[in-house]
Amino acid sequence: MLIDETFFTGELHIEGVISYTGVPSKTNEASNYELKSLIAQYELEFYRKILGYDNAKKFVGYIESGEGEEKWDNLKNMLVEQVGNRKVSPVAYYVFFFYLRKNQTQATPIGNIEESSSNKISPCNIKMINAWNQMAYMNRYISDYLYDHRDDYGGYFFDEHLLEFMNKMGI
């Protein structure tokens, strides 16, 4: 796939995913495993939402094969951008949004537990909203590109919800 844990730095930083000491720990491994499983799930979902089911399958096949094809090369270049020493992608923002949503509560045998204010952890709604809105902003360019080149991709399948901005109320 296109993204990995290296995309989750800066404003998408997830503590414990990248070991800064150079010595991996069990906590780093667990965090990394969780992120990788969410990437696998939500990256594919993102492609299905922007390309439709069949084109998403073709795009993933293109990524895995490493073969060059102009229409997929162009899309790939729009989905991953190098900004300074950091890679940026609307896919990473999409995954980050769902990572934060998943980790707002912890499932236990007796039910879901929310973090309490005594733990000094602030709610992640602001980070979630910022991640979603940044993704929606980046998606505008991708949507325009896919619409302009719809004949190359067998139509225009972009899920319009990925272009909508959120506010603090989550709407």
Image (cartoon, grey):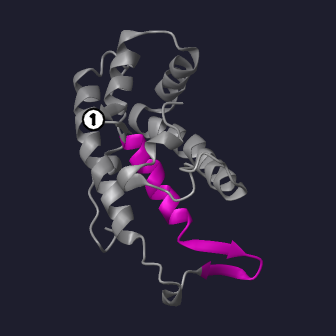
Of residues 48 and 80, the one drawn nearer to the viewer in this rendering:
80
Across and down, in percent, residue 138 comes to 27, 42
| Residue occupied by mark 1 | 143
User: Going by the image, does 65 lie left or right of 80?
Assistant: right
Residue drawn at point x = 43 percent, y = 40 percent: 49
Please state, as top left, top right, bottom left or bottom right, where the N terminus lies in the image: top right
Quarter of the image where one finds residue 73: top left
The stretch drawn in magenta includes residue 107: yes
Region of the chain picked out in magenta, as a range = 90-113
User: Going by the image, does 15 lie left or right of 143?
Assistant: right
The stretch drawn in magenta includes residue 160: no
Of residues 40 and 27, the one drawn nearer to the viewer in this rendering:
27
Across and down, in percent, residue 112 comes to 65, 78
User: Which residue ends up furthest to the bottom in the rendered image?
Assistant: 118
Give the amino acid type for the residue marked by disc 1 in the picture. Answer: Ser
Across and down, in percent, residue 76 comes to 39, 25
Across and down, in percent, residue 46 comes to 46, 41
